[in-house]
Each structure stands twice: as structure tokens, then as C-alpha cells.
């Protein structure tokens, strides 16, 4: 059936601020949905409170409401805009919940708004464990077995029936599941069951079989209104049951199921999707498989696009959100074409001829006292995905993508001692694959590790093979690695850094690179084509490997590479992807072929529809360099991708690769505290007294000179990582040592802390001739709270025109002195009517999307064009620098404290928020201003 | 270190040579020796053992596009015939060690036991793209002769599949009863029938007797079948005039007929339609097939290098019941001149999705309508969730 013509206006609900468990994957799906619905001629109304999203850009929707996501705010939009339909499946649980609340009120029906893409009843079934259980029972899907016990004796019988310990006990009707848990050993059994029976008001406990250690799988489904169902992707979790899938290392496609097992799972998934309603859209189903018996049971079903469906889209090349939104407006799968091949049907199941590995990224170092053990409660803040021809290659590339200092799966430094590795393996931690590698290095067997970790032996075999290759490299000097051997090594994902570390002679990464290139070993670039090469494909979506021929053909157009920002983490999140996407679009508008390199599957930048060419690769020097040597672009844009891209600037400089925008020497000048202070002195701009130190002794000496309180921080970091306020020399010593534990050899910076100062964040663009201030934001919280964690108001709410003028003058002189070409962000503190400059960052800042949304000026786009040669005057002439802001815009930080109940809620110079929301206010009576203002001093800590 | 890795780093050299002069080097897996055949590829990501033992692949070298093969070992239940049928195996990354609690034999040992030659460490994607452009061609795998020129010569001289009758080589020699049930009696013309087709009939409660491909129709009719099934199988159907005559005669009996793959092509030829050799062929488990009667799409298992020309199908003979959504080729026919239908793809799956299993039920319905025979049956475990 063709698309529906009875609906014209569609309301799309976004997912709001980024929190752990609900991140920028919903910007990816939401913007894809909005774009494709618009392309079909529908009028798209979009609501989201998150300013750092592409979906809330005018390029995405017809009408955008940047406002909070509450039932009332949705109602206001419905009443003014009168949509015919609402699509709530693209905005995560937030959007589904809102749709559900309004459904229960009968609001949609009353207003004549049809809910498309999901059956509301399906949400209820999938969210309510008991309803889900009952339904699965009705359709005959196997689930975890359980029975209610009324006595200890009965509990013992049931446990025996279920095959013995471990088992899960769940006392009936207790609040928050108290008294429940896993019983591992016989000596705990009586006590725990008795306690459960006592706690339960009806003195009953549910005895359930324990699935910890079972294999875990996910399938991504699409269905149309004609009830055609296809499986887009199968995913196998390397981490077994017990670790949240968002925290698990996952691999696509499944590796260890026979066809009979897989088809049975496929059948079950389809049956389950059909059982929860007749809607057209996407769905995610999770299963557990007992490795001993092969028994398969259903875990859960989610009737919406998800983190996994974003991953599945990137892993297969199949645009799930785009197709799901077309299905929601009436198309059937057989009517749609596969975008990737352009010729075959969209109604098929992608075939992969490569392996995809996802590794989650955590930020535990931000939260003192946090429990790092991975459980069923998600803790990851981001993730990386890597594509390789084989699992070993994709695993190593994923480690190179993580940006936590590793050059692959270990083999780049000394291992931790044996006892530490053993301890680390006993529980589930984020670095499990690395610890497995370490254990093999110390001679552990596959059987032993399978027993401890419950990771499927197939994965263990593969990791053991990697270690064996590593050992083979150790027996050779670089010159002893011949073509065949080196090729195997590179095909297994080893980086040049790892090889340099492993070979017997003392060589550098550069020497390894030169040597292997001498052997003729450069990577090939393969196409992600959804069909394993069966049909020609036209989507320019590539990954690197070491095969015999390259499929990425270099065009003769002028081209520019934009480096992405890698995995999301606190301090470097979606805001930078926002800037990257605009960088790509702007470069295209300037007539360049825009090439994107990034490894974050959640983002819009890795949507193969965005750039002219996408390399889904680690933003890791060797991999980036390989691409640059292949593409030979005019230059590289590094200032949009946060610290990730910036860190590579020195390498570009060294290798004679042109940096488009502010030059490395000037970026370095801003980062180097002593050089920057000299500049400020020269420009007669006040700055707090400072010092730099390379030893504890030196740090204390500097601290005593500067005076207390002072800020202690490492250099070259984002989000105030490791930054603390010290009030005496003991604290200075403590903090310096803490920093060095995480970042050895870092130069420590010390600044006098301007207590009770007013902090400002200023974003500007410089085109070489003039500096244009895009926005001045005044923080509500006092200086000392990281700017990312502060509530910021634009324009300033309590600064005199005189002071604002000073701010502009300083921006002008700093921008010009640093020869900024593109964006610059400067942080200032005002104390006793004196404006101090704290730091300057000649790159896109976290606040760029906020300023863009608040003022309606496309800052990232303009900045990119300026980098490529445009002048600010051209934009001014066209009126494009005019702010449309009426009143004030407030940027509100959003935290994910509830994920870390053991951590004390406190704010300081180190950033802890995961996301942000925007609110437009007319005056200061508005609670978006009043509330943070009243509480501004509450959480300030160190 | 483990033996596996010794193999990876230091294993016996093996070469794959194509008739057009392409030679690639890899390492030997399975049986050490030499083999040849038409090089084709399959895009299924699971089910390698089913594929290797599918009689339709008789004499072909099978290249798997999914890089890791051998992950879960082998088991008797995954066999589609009594022995592997492909003449050779080409993979990117062979799993010498496997993981599955219920399996004891690795793919390597399985291949050694059945004298099946294989090569690993090959850039299969490059070869797939090569074949996609140049069309299928013959090839030779060898770990005994490593001389490029000699191997290319052998590949060039390998007998072409074109015009080759192969069904008789894989057909059962003597008729046997596969199942005795309470329902319909199904006579199977075995051109290389996949075991899962027989299992599917058995699961419907049928009595199943399997006949040699050259069996005279009279012999089959004497058994008093309620339905006659023409199986899948290898080779060029146009090289089987005797069989086509038998099929034609069967079409005049009024007994319900069902054909899969080669059987489908034979029914088409018997009805006077044209069959042609495809440039690349369809081999995988993800091809969309639309049922033109219901409008529904099935994700199907495919394995064919020949196809029925849909232009040659005229209204009075029958109508197209199924079509391939990727390239609009003909996938199924419902005949009008007799109670017969046939499909080009594989509703028995194995490996692949169960979406098309309903075709076995449709055959049962035809039989019930015409012969008045009803079967009672129990759904086998692997099919309990099969979507209907």
C-alpha cells in the first residue's frame, strides 16, 4: 500500500536531554525519521528540549519546538499545531511514556490525533513484567521458570526442580524488590529464603531460575502493515546475562548459534512482535540461551527504535529509523528500495561479510566511590563500534576507538600482575576482553576462562589466537617480519604501536609504518553494502582492513576531512557531533567533497546519508593517517570534534598535513598555560595567578606562591577531567598524585581560584579580519562549578553594558592574537568588577549548539565556511548574524545521578552532567531561572 | 601455543585458481588434496554444514561470504544428505576450534573424514566481486600442485556445468521409505533431495517414498501416491529430456504435484516454458520473494544457477505465484492445466528462514481437496515458533 494521504501533519517527540541509557542514538533516529517523512511531503512538527541535537535544526523539521517534554507542553503544541498523527517511537522511553500518559487520559482520541508506529497497548504489555509474562505464556514462548514457595521446604523442592543453585528469590509484594537476590551457595539458601518469606506480607517467595552466565542475544525487527516481518540484524553479547546489554561488548552478526538455533530464535522473535499488536514499525527482542542445554528463553521486547537499532543500522547499512518511519505512514516493505544498492528491495535481511564489535565507554573516574562492577543497571555513557573482516580485527579496532590510551587489545604496555588480573576477572568489568587477553598471556586455558567468565569459548579461542600472534611477533625483530607474516598481523588488527612495542628491537611507530609500507602493506577500504557483495552498492560507506583490493575510489573533487569526536563521554558528547555534522554540511555547501571519520554508532555524523563519504574508523592516528594517505584531501578540520580530533593536530602538523582553520601552533599556544599567560600579559588582560608543575615538590612550591584556594588540573583535557579545588598543600599533593595515576607525565596546572566570582562562557568566530561574538553566557552557579554543569543564561542577566563591552574587546584581541580561524571559546570570571580570562579554546565548544539554538544563528555552519575561506561580512550582509532571541535562553545541565546511588551528589570543577536542556524564558520569575538561582550554592564542592 | 594458531601462522599452503587466470594463495583446511568445480558463493551467515551437504551443490566449489566458518562445529542433524556434496570449500577465516556443548566434531575433522578439500585465508569478498562482474566460472583448489600455470590449465579444462545432467549422480539408487505416516502418500522423485524436504513431509504425517530420478512413472503410480514431489538437485534441467517426459506424463494424471528448484524447472520445461542459465545465480538465505496471491513477502533460501523465463509463461498454462523482489525473476508457478505448483526457492529452508514453510501445507490442502486425504501431525521442536 502506498503512503497515507489522510494524514498531513505529524508530531515527532524527541528523547530530551542525554542521560545514561538514553543518548544521542535518538537524535540519529529522530532526525532520520523527520528527514524521511519530510521527503514524503509530510509536515513535520518536532518537539525536544535538547538543543544539542540535529533533529531540532531547521534543516530537519518544518516546525520545531525547543521546550520541555511534559504532557502539558505536548498538549500546548497539539492545540496550536493540530497534527493528524504522532510518532512516539523515535524518542526512546521518554517519548513512549509521554504518548502513553496522554493515551490514558484519552487525549489523543479527544484531539483526533492518531498514534502511529506503535500500538499504545504494546507499550503497556512490554513495560509490565507480569503482563508480558502472561502474554508469552499464551503464545507459548519459553521463559525463565519459576514457582511460588510458601515454606522453606517448598523452596527447597522448587530449587531442586529448577536444577539447583544458583537461583533467584523474589519475595512477593515487597517494595522495590527488597529481600530479593541471587542465591549462589547452599549455606546462604536457608537464611535468604527465610528472610524473603518473613519480608513478604503474604509470606511467599518466587523461586526463579538464575540466568546469570547464559548467552544473550538481540534481534532487530521491522514490520509493515501487511504484516511482513524482516530481521535486520542479529547481535550476540560477548558478556553473558547479568550485564546490561548497553554495558556489554556485543558482536554482530551472531557467531555461535547453529542455523537451527538461529531460525528458531527468529521465529520466536516474529511471533512475539506479532503478539503485541499490529503496528508497523521497529522492534527489538532479547533472548537468553542456556549454554549447557541450548534452551532458549525470551527476556524482553521493545516496540521502538533503540540503542541497539542504531547500532544495527550502522552495522548493516540498513537505515532502520528511516524505513520504520515510512512504514508508520503506510508504506509496505515491498514498496521500498534498499537505499544502499539502489536497485534491490528493502524487504530483505542484510548479509554481512565482516564482523562488528561494539564496546561501551564508561566514565567511572568522574564519580568517586562508584561501584565499577557491571550489573543489570546500565552505567556506560557512550560506545564505540568497529568493523573488521574478522572478529579479532574488529575487536582490536574497537579498542583503538575507545580513546582511553590503548593501541589495541593490550600488547602496548606491561600487563598488570597476575593476581590483579585474576581479581578483575572474577566479576564483570568494562575491560573484560583485555583481562581475558592478559590471562591468556599468563597461560590461562580457554576452559578455565570460560568457567570463570562464562564468555563463549569461541570468543575466547579468537582472543587466544590474537595472543598467539602477539607471541610470534615477540620472537622477531622488525626486519624479520616478512610480507606474509606482517599481513597476518595487520589482518588481525594490530596497530603499528603494538608492533613497535612487541618486536625485539627498539623501534618507533613511525618506523613500523615505514617498514610495512615498504613491504607494500597498506589497508584496503571495503564497502558496507548490506548484501555481502552480491549486488553492486552505491552508498559511500567504508571500513578499513587488509584485503587485496580497495573499493573506495578517490574522486578528483577538492575534498576535506572532518574528524569526528569518537565515543560519547561526560564532557565530550553529542554537542561535538552536532558541530561535526554542520561542518560536513557546510563543507558540502562550499563545493567540497566532505569526508567523515568517526567510530561512534549512536551519532548523526556516522549516518551514511550525511557526509559524501563515511569512513567508520577509529579516530586513532594510524587509521586516520591511512585514510588521509588514500584520499589526499586538501586538509583536515580538527576544531569541531572536541579533544579527540584536537589531540591529533600535533601529528598532522608534524606530517605536513594541512589543518583547515586555526593552526596547531596557535592552538598549542592557547593550551600552554605559560605561553597563554604571556599573551594575556601582552594584551593587558587580567588573569588569575598561575603556575605549572612537573613534580609534587614543584606543585607545592607554586601553590604556596599563588595562594589558596587554587585550582589543580591536568593539561590537555576536556570536561575538567581531574580538576579539583585545593585549600592547602596536603590537598595539592593528593590531587596531583590522583592526576598522575590516570595521566602519567601530564603537566599540572595551578590557578588561583576566584571564589564567589561570576563565570562567563563566550563563543566567537574569527575570520582573520574580525572577531564576531556569537554569544555571552552568564552562569547562575558561582565560579568553581564546571561550566558544563552550570546553568547558563544568554544573554547575561546581571552584567552592565560596560562589562559586556570589555568582554567583547577581550574576545577581539584574543581571537586576533591567536590567529583564530573558525571558532573560539573563552571562559572568564568577573570579580570585583574586574574581568579575568581563565582559559581560551580555539575550537568548537560544548555551548555552540546551545548558542545556535538560542540565537537562531547557524554558528557551526558559518564557522566551517569561514575556515574554508568565507568572510563574516558576507554573512552579516545577508542578515545571517542577526539573533532572533527574544527574552533569555537558559541552558540547564542534566545529571544521571540515579545510576550511581553510591556516589554523593556534588558539583565542582570536574564535569559530571551527561546532558542538557534549553528553556526560553521571558523574565526571571520563570522557574527555569528561579529554581537554579535559589539553589546555586547548594552542591558546590571540590 | 595452541595448535590452531600454529596452523594460522604456519600452515600448509593451498591455492585457488580460476579459469580466467586468477590465482589466490591461502592455507589448506580439511582434506589435503586437489579438487575442482564451478566456483559459486553463498551469503548465508549460518548453516554452513547444511550448505556443504546440499545435493543441489553437487560438484560446485562453495565460497562462503561470511568470514568465520566452522564456529559451532558439525553434527549429523545438520546434514542434508548422507555426505558433503560440494566439491570444495573456500572461506576467509576458518574456525579450527569450535564451541557448542552438543557437538563433538570440528568442521576440519568433518572435512577430513569426508575427503573434502578446502582453502582458508582467502579474500572471499574480492572473489565475490570478481564473479559478480565476470559471471560464475570453474576453479581448482589444490594443496598438492602449487604451480599457477598448471592450476589455471586444470581449471580451464574442468568440465562445464552448462548442459550437464547431474541429478542421476546424487539420486538414491533404490526406492526406500523415508517415513510411514497416517496421512498422504508422497512419492518423491529424487534428483538430489534435501533431507529437510523429506523431514517436512514427514512432519505433516505423510508416508514418504523416495524414488530414483529415472524411475518410470508407472512404477511410482503403482505405489498409489496422493501427491508427487519433484525435488531440487544439481545440474542443467535442459539436459534431462527423459525426466521432462516423465514429468509431463505426471501432469496428465491429475495427481497433485509439487516441485522445488530443479523440480520447479522440470515442471516448467514439461509445460513448454523456457529455462536459462543465470549470470551469477541466487545463493543465500535473505532473498525477498513476494507471494502474488497474498501480497506477503517471504525471506527465502535460494540456491539456483538456472531460472525459468517468465516471458515464456502464458496465461493458459499457469500464472506467476511468486516473484523475486530484487530482480523480478520468476520464483513460483501455479499451473492451470493440472493441480501442480512449484517454486524456484527453498521452502524447506535448512539453512534459512521458515517463512515459506506454508507451501508444504498448501500441498497438503491440494491433496486433501483432490484426494480426500487428511493428515494429522505434530510440529517438530525446531518449528514450534515458526510464524504462520
Image: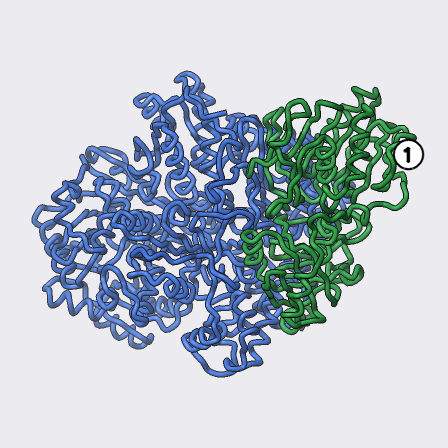
> Could you say where residue B128 lies in the image, as x and y percent from the top left?
57, 54
**Secondary element at tag 1:** helix
In the current view of this chain or complex, which residue is farthest to the top? A110
Q: Residue under circle 1? A: B219
| Residue A244 visible in the displayed image | no
> Could you say where residue A41 lies in the image, as x and y percent from the top left?
36, 28
Count up the numbered dots: 1
> Could you say where residue A415 lies in the image, as x and y percent from the top left?
53, 72
The chosen color scheme is by chain
Image check: B176 left or right of B259?
right
| Residue A694 visible in the displayed image | yes
The residue that appears at 73% across and 42% down in the rendered structure is B237
Colour chosen for chain B? green
Which sits in the foreground, A382 or A236? A236
Image check: B203 left or right of A483?
right
Q: Chain of mark 1?
A: B
Other-residue count near label 1 (Cα within 10 Å), few / some / many at <14 / 14–19 / ≥20: few
Colour chosen for chain A? blue
Amino acid at each position: 500500500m502506498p503512503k497515507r494521504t489522510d494524514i498531513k501533519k505529524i508530531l515527532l517527540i524527541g528523547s530530551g536531554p542525554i542521560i545514561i541509557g538514553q543518548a544521542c542514538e535518538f537524535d540519529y533516529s529522530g532526525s532520520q525519521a523527520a528527514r524521511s517523512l519530510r521527503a514524503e511531503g509530510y509536515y513535520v512538527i518536532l518537539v525536544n528540549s535538547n538543543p544539542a541535537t540535529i533533529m531540532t535544526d531547521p534543516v530537519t523539521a518544518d516546525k520545531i519546538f525547543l521546550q520541555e517534554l511534559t504532557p502539558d507542553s505536548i498538549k500546548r503544541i497539539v492545540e496550536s499545531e493540530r497534527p493528524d498523527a504522532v510518532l512516539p517511537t523515535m524518542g526512546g522511553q521518554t517519548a513512549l511514556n509521554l504518548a502513553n500518559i496522554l493515551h490514558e487520559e484519552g487525549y489523543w482520541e479527544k484531539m483526533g490525533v492518531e498514534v502511529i508506529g506503535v500500538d499504545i497497548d504494546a507499550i503497556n504489555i512490554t513495560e509490565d513484567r507480569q503482563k508480558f509474562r502472561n502474554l508469552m505464556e499464551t503464545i507459548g514462548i519459553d521463559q525463565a521458570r519459576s514457582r511460588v514457595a510458601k515454606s522453606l521446604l517448598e523452596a527447597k523442592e522448587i530449587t531442586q526442580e529448577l536444577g539447583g543453585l544458583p537461583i533467584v528469590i523474589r519475595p512477593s509484594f515487597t517494595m522495590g524488590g527488597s529481600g530479593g537476590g541471587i542465591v549462589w551457595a547452599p549455606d546462604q539458601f536457608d537464611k535468604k529464603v527465610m528472610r524473603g518469606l518473613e519480608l513478604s506480607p503474604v509470606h511467599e517467595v518466587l523461586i526463579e531460575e538464575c540466568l546469570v552466565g547464559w548467552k544473550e542475544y538481540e534481534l532487530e525487527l521491522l514490520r509493515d502493515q501487511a504484516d511482513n516481518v524482516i530481521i535486520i540484524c542479529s547481535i550476540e553479547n560477548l558478556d553473558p546475562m547479568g550485564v546490561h546489554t548497553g554495558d556489554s561488548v556485543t558482536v554482530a552478526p551472531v557467531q555461535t548459534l547453529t542455523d537451527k538455533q538461529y531460525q528458531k530464535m527468529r521465529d520466536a522473535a516474529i511471533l512475539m512482535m506479532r503478539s503485541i499488536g499490529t503496528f508497523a514499525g521497529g522492534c527489538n527482542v532479547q533472548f537468553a540461551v542456556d549454554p549447557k542445554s541450548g534452551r532458549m528463553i525470551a527476556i524482553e521486547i521493545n516496540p521502538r527504535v533503540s540503542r541497539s537499532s542504531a547500532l544495527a543500522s550502522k552495522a548493516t547499512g540498513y537505515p532502520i529509523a528511516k524505513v520504520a518511519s515510512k512504514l508508520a505512514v503506510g508504506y509496505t516493505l515491498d514498496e521500498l528500495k534498499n537505499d544502499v544498492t539502489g536497485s534491490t528491495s528493502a524487504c530483505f535481511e542484510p548479509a554481512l561479510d565482516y564482523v562488528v564489535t561494539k564496546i561501551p565507554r564508561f566514565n567511572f573516574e568522574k564519580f568517586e566511590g562508584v561501584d565499577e562492577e557491571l550489573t543489570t543497571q546500565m552505567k556506560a555513557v557512550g560506545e564505540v563500534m568497529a568493523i573488521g573482516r574478522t572478529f579479532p580485527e574488529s575487536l582490536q579496532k574497537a579498542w583503538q576507538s575507545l580513546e582511553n590510551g590503548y593501541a589495541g587489545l593490550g600488547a602496548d604496555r606491561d600487563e598488570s600482575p597476575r593476581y590483579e588480573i585474576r581479581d578483575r576477572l572474577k566479576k564483570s568489568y568494562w575491560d573484560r576482553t583485555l583481562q581475558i587477553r592478559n590471562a591468556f598471556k599468563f597461560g590461562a586455558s580457554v576452559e578455565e576462562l570460560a568457567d570463570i567468565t562464562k564468555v563463549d569459548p569461541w570468543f575466547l579461542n579468537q582472543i587466544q589466537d590474537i595472543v598467539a600472534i602477539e607471541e610470534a611477533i615477540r620472537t622477531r625483530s622488525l626486519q624479520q617480519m616478512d610480507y606474509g607474516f606482517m599481513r597476518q598481523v595487520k589482518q588481525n588488527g594490530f596497530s603499528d604501536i603494538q608492533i613497535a612495542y612487541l618486536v625485539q628491537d627498539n623501534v618507533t611507530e613511525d618506523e613500523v609504518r615505514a617498514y610495512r609500507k615498504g613491504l607494500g602493506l597498506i589497508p584496503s577500504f571495503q564497502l558496507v553494502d548490506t548484501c555481502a557483495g552480491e549486488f553492486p552498492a552505491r552508498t559511500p560507506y567504508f571500513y578499513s582492513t587488509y584485503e587485496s583490493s580497495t573499493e573506495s575510489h578517490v574522486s578528483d573533487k577538492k575534498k576535506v576531512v572532518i574528524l569526528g569526536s569518537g565515543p560519547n563521554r561526560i564532557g565530550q558528547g553529542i554537542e561535538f557531533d552536532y558541530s561535526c555534522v554542520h561542518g560536513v554540511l557546510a563543507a558540502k555547501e562550499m563545493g567540497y567533497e566532505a569526508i567523515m571519520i568517526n567510530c561512534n554508532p549512536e551519532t548523526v555524523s556516522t549516518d551514511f546519508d550525511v557526509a559524501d563519504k563515511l569512513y567508520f574508523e577509529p579516530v586513532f592516528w594510524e587509521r586516520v593517517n591511512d585514510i588521509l594517505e588514500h584520499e589526499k584531501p586538501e586538509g583536515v578540520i580538527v576544531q569541531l570534534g572536541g579533544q579527540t580530533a584536537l589531540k591529533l593536530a600535533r601529528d598532522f602538523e608534524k606530517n605536513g598535513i594541512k589543518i583547515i582553520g586555526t593552526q596547531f601552533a596557535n592552538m598549542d599556544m592557547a593550551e600552554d598555560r605559560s605561553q597563554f599567560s604571556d599573551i594575556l600579559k601582552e594584551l593587558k588582560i587580567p588573569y588569575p595567578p598561575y603556575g605549572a608543575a612537573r613534580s609534587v615538590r614543584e606543585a607545592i612550591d607554586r601553590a604556596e606562591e599563588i595562594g589558596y584556594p587554587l585550582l589543580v588540573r591536568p593539561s590537555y583535557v576536556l570536561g575538567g577531567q581531574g580538576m579539583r579545588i585545593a585549600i592547602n598543600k596536603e590537598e595539592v599533593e593528593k590531587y596531583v598524585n590522583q592526576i598522575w595515576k590516570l595521566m602519567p607525565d601530564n603537566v599540572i596546572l595551578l590557578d588561583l581560584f576566584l571564589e564567589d566570582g561570576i563565570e562567563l562562557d563566550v563563543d566567537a568566530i574569527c575570520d582573520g579580519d574580525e572577531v564576531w561574538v556569537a554569544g555571552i553566557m552568564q552562569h547562575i552557579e558561582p565560579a568553581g562549578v564546571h561550566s558544563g554543569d552550570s546553568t547558563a543564561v544568554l544573554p547575561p542577566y546581571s552584567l552592565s553594558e560596560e562589562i559586556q563591552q570589555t568582554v567583547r574587546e577581550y574576545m577581539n584581541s584574543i581571537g586576533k592574537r591567536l590567529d583564530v580561524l573558525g571558532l573560539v571559546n573563552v571562559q572568564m570570571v568577573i570579580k570585583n568588577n574586574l574581568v579575568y580570562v581563565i582559559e581560551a579554546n580555539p575550537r568548537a565548544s560544548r555551548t555552540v549548539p546551545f548558542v545556535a539554538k538560542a540565537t537562531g544563528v547557524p554558528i557551526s555552519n558559518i564557522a566551517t565556511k569561514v575556515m574554508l575561506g568565507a568572510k563574516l561580512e558576507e554573512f552579516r550582509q545577508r542578515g545571517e548574524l542577526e539573533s532572533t532571541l527574544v527574552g533569555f535562553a537558559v541552558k540547564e545541565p542534566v545529571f544521571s545521578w540515579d545510576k550511581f546511588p553510591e556516589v554523593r551528589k556534588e558539583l565542582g570543577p570536574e564535569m559530571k552532567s551527561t546532558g542538557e536542556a534549553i528553556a526560553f524564558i521571558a523574565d526571571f520569575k520563570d522557574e527555569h531561572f528561579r529554581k537554579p538561582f535559589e539553589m546555586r550554592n547548594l552542591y558546590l564542592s571540590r | 601455543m595452541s595448535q590452531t594458531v600454529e596452523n594460522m601462522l604456519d600452515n600448509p599452503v593451498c591455492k585457488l585458481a580460476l579459469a580466467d587466470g586468477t590465482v589466490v594463495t591461502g592455507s589448506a583446511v580439511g582434506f589435503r588434496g586437489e579438487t575442482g568445480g564451478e566456483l559459486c558463493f553463498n551469503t548465508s551467515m549460518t548453516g554452513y554444514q547444511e550448505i556443504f551437504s546440499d545435493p543441489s551443490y553437487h560438484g560446485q566449489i562453495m565460497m562462503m561470504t561470511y568470514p568465520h566458518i566452522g564456529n559451532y562445529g558439525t553434527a549429523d542433524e545438520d546434514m542434508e544428505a548422507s555426505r558433503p556434496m560440494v566439491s570444495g570449500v573456500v572461506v576467509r577465516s576458518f574456525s579450527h576450534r569450535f564451541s557448542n556443548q552438543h557437538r563433538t566434531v570440528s568442521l576440519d575433522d568433518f572435512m577430513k573424514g569426508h575427503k573434502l578439500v578446502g582453502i582458508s585465508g582467502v579474500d572471499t569478498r574480492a572473489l565475490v566481486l570478481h564473479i559478480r562482474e565476470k559471471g560464475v566460472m570453474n576453479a581448482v583448489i589444490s594443496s598438492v600442485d602449487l604451480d599457477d600455470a598448471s592450476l589455471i590449465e586444470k581449471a580451464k579444462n574442468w568440465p562445464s556445468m552448462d548442459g550437464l545432467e547431474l541429478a542421476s549422480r546424487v539420486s538414491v539408487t533404490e526406492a526406500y521409505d523415508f517415513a510411514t505416516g497416517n496421512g498422504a502418500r508422497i512419492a518423491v522423485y529424487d534428483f538430489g533431495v534435501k533431507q529437510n524436504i523429506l523431514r517436512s513431509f514427514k512432519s505433516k504425517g505423510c508416508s514418504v517414498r523416495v524414488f530414483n530420478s529415472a524411475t518410470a512413472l508407472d512404477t511410482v503410480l503403482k505405489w498409489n501416491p496422493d501427491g508427487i514431489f519433484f525435488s531440487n538437485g544439481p545440474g542443467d534441467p535442459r539436459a534431462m529430456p527423459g525426466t521432462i517426459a516423465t514429468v509431463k506424463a505426471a501432469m496428465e494424471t491429475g495427481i497433485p504435484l509439487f516441485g522445488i528448484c530443479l523440480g520447479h524447472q522440470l515442471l516448467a520445461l514439461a509445460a513448454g516454458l523456457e529455462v536459462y542459465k543465470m549470470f551469477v545465480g541466487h545463493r543465500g538465505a535473505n532473498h525477498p520473494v513476494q507471494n502474488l496471491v497474498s501480497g506477503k513477502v517471504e525471506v527465502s533460501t535460494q540456491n539456483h544457477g538456472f531460472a525459468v523465463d517468465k516471458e515464456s509463461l502464458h496465461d493458459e498454462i499457469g500464472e506467476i505465484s511468486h516473484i523475486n523482489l530484487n530482480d523480478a525473476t520468476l520464483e513460483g508457478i501455479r499451473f492451470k492445466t493440472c493441480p501442480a505448483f512449484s517454486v524456484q526457492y527453498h521452502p524447506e529452508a535448512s539453512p534459512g528462514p521458515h517463512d515459506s514453510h506454508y507451501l508444504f501445507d498448501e500441498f497438503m490442502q491440494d491433496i486433501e481437496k483432490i484426494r480426500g486425504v487428511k493428515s494429522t501431525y505434530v510440529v517438530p521442536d525446531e518449528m514450534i515458533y515458526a510464524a504462520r
